[in-house]
Amino acid sequence: MKKLAVCLTLSLAALVPFGQDSKAAANFTDVGTTHRAQAEIYYLVEGGITSGVSETRFVPEQQVTRVQAAAMLGRTLNLNGEQRATNFKDVGKNNFASGYIQQLVDKKIISGYADGSFKPNNTLSRGEMALLIGHTFDYNASSVSVAAGSLISKGISQGVADGSFGVSQSINRGDFAVFLARSINADFRTADNEKFEHDAYVDTKDGSKLNLRTGPNTTYPSIGSIPSGKIVSYSYSVGDWVYITSDNVKGFVHSAYLQSDKPSDKPVVTPPTPTPPVKPDPTPVPTPPGKKPLSDITVVIDAGHGGWDPGSSGNGFIEKNVTLNVAKKMEKYYAKVPMKAIMTRTDDTYISPSARGAYPKKVKGDIFVSIHTNSHTGGAANGTETFYYTKSAAVNPNVSQSKALAQYVQNRQLEAWGLTDRGVKEGNFAVLRENNVPAVLAELGFITNKKDIGIMGTEAGREKMARGLFLATLDYYYYYENRKDVLPLYSTVNATPSGKLH
């Protein structure tokens, strides 16, 4: 699809200096129609991913620095580029790419050096480029050689004159533009081996049509529209955007408007097979001596991430959307019982981890369940795990309570989904560490794994998980807190206690 990329240059205008956000277009005197990287350079410029060193010059032969690469990759993934403090002594808050660098570090895409530096002005080598692109696009990038092999097999990169990949050679702006554009848009590649093997329904929520764009952000032009409810096929993700085909036209749509089920489908609640021997009695049981009434118990439900922090992404799904969906479903179960539920967020809002951890104290909560999805470069890792904090009882003293709650949460997750058991683990997370009540962090599954998302990505699957997390809180109170007045609550979902685990 080279013709499409070339024709994009017709709408280009002037740019701001290289390294700053640029969404205008340009006409570079040093990137003519015969330049080997002409189409790719203008493609990235149009999407605001890169820019020229001046209004008229791109300087394709100039070497790429680590800070420039970080900025381009951050813009590719639509990360929040707001300047902020970083982990590195040589990248201050005022560095133009500080926001991108820190977010890429948090996502384990880029890293610094053992001495605590980032070395932002060091030039980038071809080997480093291969690793960065491999991590950014979830290729198999366990080593430089493996990463380079992935780029070659996908038709993104080629070797150098001596037949090697040239891992130690520095890379210039023109070549980096080629490799990045090819990673983003498969139509630029020299190999045609991306398959559209997965189907999804378009759901625009309001019935409007969904724009199909030439690139993974709204700066790229629309090349068509897709009606809500239509089935499309998708190949891979670029951040929150998905490369799809519809009616033989390829392009990008935002993953928030794709789902596995028909938009009109209603959630299906499938109760698990009863296993424990205890049969709930619907007759109310008196409050145990010394315990507060069930109506005074508040479960705090924390939907991980939100707002400018999307969390992990994969297979067309975004963590912040999955966690909020499960949290809302979980909350509804408490409407049928005396216990209450309060959510840390009910919409797409960013809340800091420290604020989440402090929330139970603010609302007088009693236990805290944080909902997340996992991710892994390459997509091989899979399964469910649950974390609790135990590093220092001086921070959150509810160690034994949190561990017990984690055991019941993990058990119900496995019961609901039947995924690989990754176990109950200690985790030093702010939402757990800075809490003052029994607190756990549930990793539902790997959003990057096709088996896990095959369940997690459906309304029915998320309903099962929400039900399981609700039952886990009942199990905790029934067994750990020895509250027999909880027993009748199981009948509201036709369930039974799990059996004592702690």
Image (cartoon, rainbow, N blue to C red):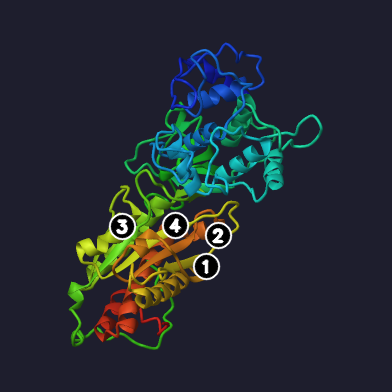
Quadrant that contains the C terminus: bottom left
Q: Is residue 238 above or below residue 58?
A: below
Crowd rating for badge 1 (residues with CA inside 10 Å; few <14, some 14–19, many 20+): some
Q: CA distance from mark 4 to mark 1?
A: 15 Å
- In the structure shown, which secondary structural element does the residue marked by tag 2 occupy? helix
Quadrant of the image containing the N terminus = top right
Q: Position of residue 490 (x, y in %)?
A: 31, 78
Residue 348 point in image, percent of width and height: 32, 47
Query: 316 left or right of 61?
Result: left
Q: Circle 4 is placed at which residue position?
A: 458
Kind of residue at disc 2: Lys
Alpha-carbon span between mark 2 and mark 1: 9 Å
Name the residue rendered at 51%, 27% in the picture.
Answer: 50
Residue that mark 1 sits on: 419
Label 2 and label 3: CA atoms lie apart by 30 Å
Q: Please tell me how crowded label 4 is: few (under 14), some (14-19), or many (20+) other residues with Cα within 10 Å.
A: some
In-image side of 30 versus 460 (left or right): right
Contact between labelled residues 1 and 3, with CB atoms less than 8 Å apart: no
Residue 356 - label: 3
- Above or below — where is 436 with respect to 86? below
Disc 4 versus disc 2: nearer the observer: 2
User: If you read the primary sequence from the N terminus, does the residue marked by circle 4 or circle 1 appear first?
Assistant: 1
Whether residues under marks 2 and 1 lie with C-beta atoms below 8 angstroms apart, the answer is: yes
> Could you tell me how far apart the alpha carbons at marks 4 and 2 are, in whole angstroms?
12 Å
**Residue designated by label 2:** 451
- The tag on residue 181 is none
Q: Could you say which quadrant of the image residue 373 lies in?
A: bottom left
